[in-house]
Image (spheres, rainbow, N blue to C red):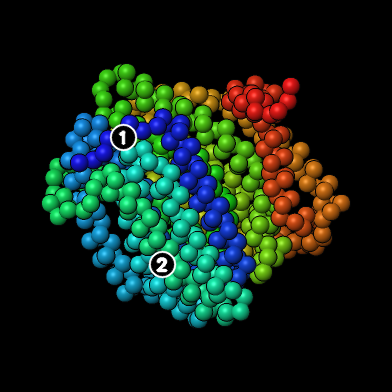
């Protein structure tokens, strides 16, 4: 019998998700920095990035997004109706199906790794292609294990236990970091990357096992009578899973198309794009995923009710979610655009040069333009999932795929040449395309949801958002001026960047990593003050709380 749990408020849930994701992303940042330090952005690093991306298609296809969309609404409804025994049978039945399906797909992935590499990294030839095939075969089992870890996440989230499942990837990152450090500088590069892949596999298993004892607490130990692949709730989950998996599949195909196009742009583009994603996805994960994941169980319970009151409550939850995201996502996007060169300098060590970090910044600047749209689209997709409508997000994702593939092809392979830029700048065009289609997806999702539940009057209306944008831009410009002044006094010259044919002069750069923390804290402080001065209530509340804790009279 499942243990009852009332659960925290959705605000606390979002904080728990955000805290877990923050720990995960910080450990991921350290992991990526070490990968960049030891592997650089050359052919071996590109092979590793491609090998990680190809099997991750499986994880993302059947993992968190699809499970959340199909499983949590049904599971939460059963628990809200006190049908705990049926909820447990649903959970174990789904586990049995996932275990069987993933086992088959992993075997097929290992067998047909060469075909997958040809499809999704067509620019790789010779030894680089052979290495990518080998690494893909090592990594494929790890993604199967991570799909089961996403099943754990669905169970824990439904019981409002948000922190552990989102912090569990810290263990995964820790195993990869340990593998890199054990290999170190002295190991041959090709051997080191193989060693790292085995660290990925060990980390995947550890991430799953660390969550398993807590699963026992909520749904008990596995029993054969509970693991039967039948029952009406399970049939409903599988019915909803079809469009949900297809929708996630479209998103992942879009990502793989970008990866394939970047391999045609050049090997430097593949590795640099992987590094850029660490920072560009951080705000999306911290705020978009955090709020959406915390709201989904409650949205599902309310969507199960009938009448105008339930519809109003649903819209209020969406409004509150958008308001919470806006306060943090908007300054994050502005920081990536204006301060991205300094942020990307975290990777500058070992085989990564100053020119590489500026190349990553251009990708961050292009990606930042679609960040606000991506986070809201994530929340609106969760609303459709709560309404047990997985088909509408699928149709919209199909539209996104068509537009992104068509525009991205020209942006990656032709636009840079038309503008007189070096070919590797086509990867920046890919990031810009992703931002544009993110806005398209958001607008269509919002319109479709409004037709379903009525006009969504968010708490972060345009005047409120405009205040936040103004505060963030002013803070960024002031921080940029301070950074430039400090660079002239304490910085080191980095020469001329080559991305635009030599005319783009790179300013001096601060040499110490702790300058980054100092300037980002400065940027955050200025943003809070500016937002409060412009009348933002949330900023004033935060400053009031801070004032009470300071030992000042």
Between 357 and 546, the one lying in front of the other is 546
Q: Is residue 528 above or below residue 177?
A: above
According to the image, label 2 marks what residue? 201
Spatial CA span between label 1 and label 2: 34 Å
Q: Residue at x 46, y 26 (%)?
A: 319
Give the secondary structure at mark 2.
Answer: helix
First in residue order: circle 1 vs circle 2: 1
Q: Residue at x 49, y 41 (%)?
A: 18
Q: In the image, residue 60 lies at what x, y percent? A: 38, 54
Q: In the image, residue 134 lies at what x, y percent? A: 42, 76
According to the image, label 1 marks what residue? 5
Between 490 and 220, the one lying in front of the other is 220
Left or right: residue 76 versus residue 518 is: left
Q: Is residue 407 above or below residue 116?
A: above
Q: Residue at x 66, y 31 (%)?
A: 528
* Image quarter of the N terminus: top left
Judge whether residue 165 can be spotted in this image.
yes
Q: Residue at x 69, y 41 (%)?
A: 521
Judge whether residue 441 can be spotted in this image.
no
Left or right: residue 290 versus residue 489 is: left
Figure quadrant of residue 524: top right
Q: In the image, residue 322 lies at what x, y percent? A: 49, 31
């Amino acid at each position: 019998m499942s243990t009852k749990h009332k659960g925290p408020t959705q605000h606390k849930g979002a904080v728990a998700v955000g805290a877990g994701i923050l720990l995960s992303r910080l450990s991921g940042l350290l992991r990526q920095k070490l990968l960049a330090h030891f592997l650089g952005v050359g052919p071996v690093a590109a092979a590793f990035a491609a090998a990680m991306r190809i099997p991750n298609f499986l994880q993302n296809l059947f993992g968190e997004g699809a499970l959340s969309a199909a499983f949590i609404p049904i599971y939460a409804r059963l628990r809200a109706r006190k049908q705990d025994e049926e909820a447990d049978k649903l959970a174990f039945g789904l586990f049995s199906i996932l275990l069987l399906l993933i086992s088959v797909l992993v075997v097929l992935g290992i067998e047909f790794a060469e075909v997958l590499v040809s499809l999704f990294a067509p620019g790789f030839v010779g030894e680089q292609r052979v290495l990518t095939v080998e690494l893909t075969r090592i990594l494929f089992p790890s993604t199967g294990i991570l799909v089961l870890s996403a099943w754990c996440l669905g169970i824990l989230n439904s019981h409002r236990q948000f922190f552990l499942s989102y912090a569990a990837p810290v263990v995964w990152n820790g195993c990869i970091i340990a593998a890199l450090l054990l290999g170190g500088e002295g190991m041959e590069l090709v051997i080191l990357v193989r060693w790292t892949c085995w660290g990925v596999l060990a980390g995947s298993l550890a991430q799953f096992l660390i969550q398993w004892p807590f699963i026992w607490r909520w749904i008990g130990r596995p029993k054969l009578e509970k693991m039967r692949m039948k029952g009406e709730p399970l049939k409903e989950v599988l019915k909803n899973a079809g469009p949900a998996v297809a929708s996630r599949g479209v998103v992942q195909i879009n990502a793989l198309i970008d990866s394939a196009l970047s391999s045609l742009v050049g090997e430097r583009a593949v590795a640099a794009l992987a590094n850029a994603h660490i920072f560009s996805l951080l705000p999306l994960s911290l705020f978009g995923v955090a709020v959406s994941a915390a709201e989904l169980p409650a949205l599902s319970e309310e969507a199960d009710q009938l009448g105008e009151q339930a519809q109003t409550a649903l819209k209020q939850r969406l409004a509150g979610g958008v308001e919470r995201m806006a306060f943090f996502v908007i300054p994050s996007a502005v920081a990536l655009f204006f301060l991205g060169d300094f942020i990307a300098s975290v990777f500058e060590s070992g085989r990564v040069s100053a020119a590489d970090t500026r190349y990553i910044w251009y990708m961050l600047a292009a990606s930042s333009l679609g960040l606000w749209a991506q986070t809201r689209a994530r929340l609106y997709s969760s609303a459709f999932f709560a309404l047990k409508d997985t088909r509408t997000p699928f149709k919209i994702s199909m539209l996104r795929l068509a537009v992104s593939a068509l525009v991205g092809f020209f942006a990656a392979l032709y636009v840079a040449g038309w503008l007189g830029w070096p070919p590797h700048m086509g990867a920046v065009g890919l990031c810009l395309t992703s931002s544009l289609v993110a806005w398209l997806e958001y607008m269509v999702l919002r319109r479709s949801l409004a037709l379903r539940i009525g006009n969504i009057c968010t708490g972060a209306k345009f005047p409120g958002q405009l205040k936040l944008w103004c505060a963030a831009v002013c803070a960024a410009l002031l921080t940029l001026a301070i950074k430039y002044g400090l660079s002239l006094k304490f910085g080191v010259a980095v020469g001329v960047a080559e991305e635009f044919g030599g005319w783009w002069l790179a300013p001096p750069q601060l040499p110490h990593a702790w300058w980054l923390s100092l300037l980002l804290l400065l940027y955050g402080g200025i943003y809070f003050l500016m937002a409060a001065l412009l009348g933002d209530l949330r900023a004033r509340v935060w400053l009031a709380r801070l004032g009470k804790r300071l030992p000042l009279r």
